[in-house]
Image: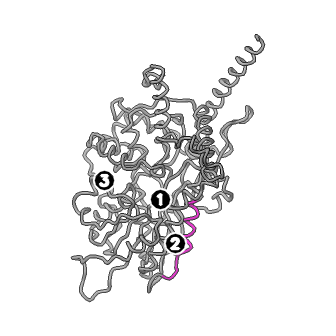
Amino acid sequence: MVATIWLVVSGLLLVVLYIRVNDAKLGRIAPEAAAFSPKRWAPEEVRHAADELASSSASLLNGQLPPKTGRRYIITGGAGFLGGWMVLHLLQRGEDPRRIRVLDIRRPIRQDLLEGAATEVDFIQVDVSDAKAIQAALDKPWPPSQSDVPGEPEPEITVFHTAATIRFFERHPSLLHLSEKVNLRGTQNVLDAARRVGASLFISTSSGSISVHSNRFFLWPWEKEPKYFTQVVNDDDTIVPKQHEDFFSNYAVSKWSAERVVRAADKTPSGKSVLRTGCIRPGNGIYGPGGDLLVGMYLVKKTNPTWIPNILQSFIYVENCSLAHLCYEARLIDLQKGGRNPDIGGQAFCVADAGPPATYGDVYNALTQLSNGACVFPRLSCSTMLALAHLVEGYDLLRHLLVRSPLAVLAKVMPRLSGDIIFLQPSMFALTLIHLVFDDSRARSPPEKGGLGYDGKITTLEGVCKVALEHQKGDGKGWERVVAGHKEEGHGFGLARAEKGVEEVIEKVANGVGVDPKKVLSS
C-alpha cells in the first residue's frame, strides 16, 4: 500500500515537473524571434501613443487611400468587420454609395454602417454557399445614381470577397467540409457569379496562416523548443505545407484551396471582358474598432486567462488590411489601362502592420494600462491548457464521427459542446503558440518593382491604443452588440474565444465548490 502511494505521488510529481519544464520552454521568446523585435512596449510609449491618438478621427487613414474610381463595388462580408471597413473606406474616398452592394449572411449592426452615406448602400442578406442566391444577388439591377452619365457605358465592377467561416479549431480531414462549404465552395460561387455579370476585378481575402506549419508542443526532455517555433512567412508559395496534416488547421487548408481557385481565374473570360484577380494574405489576427474578436473582445471580457504572453506575432490593424485590398485594386486597374508596371494579376501578397511585431504580452500590458486595470490577463499553464485542448478535441471529434456513423444513436448521450470552450483545441495552439513574423516587403514595394505600393503606416502599438480609445468612447456597448451578433462557431479569431471558454470552465468549477472564480483566476 505504501509503495503504491509512493508510486502515485512520484508520478504526480513527475507530471508537475514536466509541466513546469515544458511551460518554460514554450513560454520564452526564441532568440530568432527576438531579433525581429528586441524591445517591449514601455508604459510611457503606450501613454504617448494614446495621447497622440486621443483626438483622432474614427479612421486613421484620412487622405491616404487610393483615389476614387467611380466603379461599382460588390463586397461579400461587407456587413462585418473587415468588409465593413472596406465599405467605409470606399465612401470615405468619395465612391457613390448607390454603386456599392453588400452581400452578407447577417444584417449590419455596427453603428458606423447604420448612419450617414452607409445607409444608402444596397444590402442583400445571402449565404455565399448558396450558388443560386449569390447569382440572384449579383444579377439584381443597379439603382439609378447621380454619378450615372447618359450615353456612357455602365461602370465596371470590382468584387471584394471577404466572407469566410473561420473554424480555426478543427484539423481532422473528416471535418474539412465544414470549412470548405463557405471558404471554398462559397468562393467558387461568388467567382462564377462575378464572371457571369462581367466583373473585371476580383480581390479575395486569403490568410497568411496558410503558410503556418503544425507543431508538436509536448516536448521530449532533451528538446529545447518545437520544430517550427519561429516561422517567417512571406509570399513564397513553396513554404505552404504540402500535406493536410502539416497545415495548422482545416481553415488553412480551405483558404489555400480557395486562394488557388481565385488566382487561377486571373485573365479568364468575364462577360464581354477579362477578369483580373488577386489575393491578400493578412497578418495573424486582424483587429481594430468595429467589433474585432481579438483586441476588442479582450476589453469587453475584462478578465482574459492567457498562456502566451511571450509569443511574438505580426498583427494587422483592420484599416491597414482594407488599404492593402484597395492598393491591389488600383494596381490591377492601372494594368487594365495599359500601364507598364509588372503584371501582378493572379498573385498573393502578405500584409501586416508597420514596425516590428509585438508580443501578446505587449498587447495585454497596454490594454491593462489603458483600461486603468479593468482589463486583466491572469496567467495559466500552457501545457495544462494544451492537455485540456486535446481532451476537448477528442470529445468533439468522437461526437462528430458518431453522428455520421451507424452508431449515431450513441451521439445522443453526448451533448454538443456549447460556449467558447469549443475553440480550445490543439489547432489553436499550432497558430498562437509560435513566433510568427510576416514579411510584407514585396507588398510594400513600389508598383514599378512588382509591388502593391502598400503603405500601411499604422503600427500595432497605435492600433491597439486606437481600439482602447474607441472602446472607451462607446463604453464598450458597440463591441458587446457586435460580439453578440457573432456567436456562431465559424465567426471571429478563436484565440480570445478559447481563452473565454477556459474562463467559463473555471467559473463553473469554482462556483460549484463555493469559491470566488475571480480569486481562482488571479491566483
* Spot occupied by residue 23 in the image (x, y as percentages of width and height): 61, 31
Q: Secondary structure at mark 2?
A: loop
Query: Does the magenta segment cover residue 261?
Result: yes
Amino acid bearing label 1: Ala
Q: Nearer the viewer, residue 49 or 360?
A: 360
Which residue is located at x 38 percent, y 54 percent? Answer: 81
First in residue order: circle 2 vs circle 3: 3
**Mark in the foreground, 2 or 1:** 1
Query: Does the magenta segment cover residue 384?
Result: no
Q: Which mark is residue 344?
A: 2
Span colored in magenta: 254-269
Q: In this figure, which residue is indicated by the disc labeled 3?
A: 109
Task: Determine the CA span between mark 2 and mark 3.
Answer: 36 Å
Count neighbours of disc 2 (C-alpha within 10 A) and say few if under 14, some if 14 to 19, many if 20 or more. some
The answer to whether 435 appears left or right of 200 in the picture is right
Count neighbours of disc 1 (C-alpha within 10 A) and say few if under 14, some if 14 to 19, many if 20 or more. many
Q: Which mark is residue 164?
A: 1
Q: Secondary structure at mark 3?
A: loop
Which residue is located at x 39 percent, y 48 percent? Answer: 292
* Spot occupied by residue 373 in the image (x, y as percentages of width and height): 36, 29
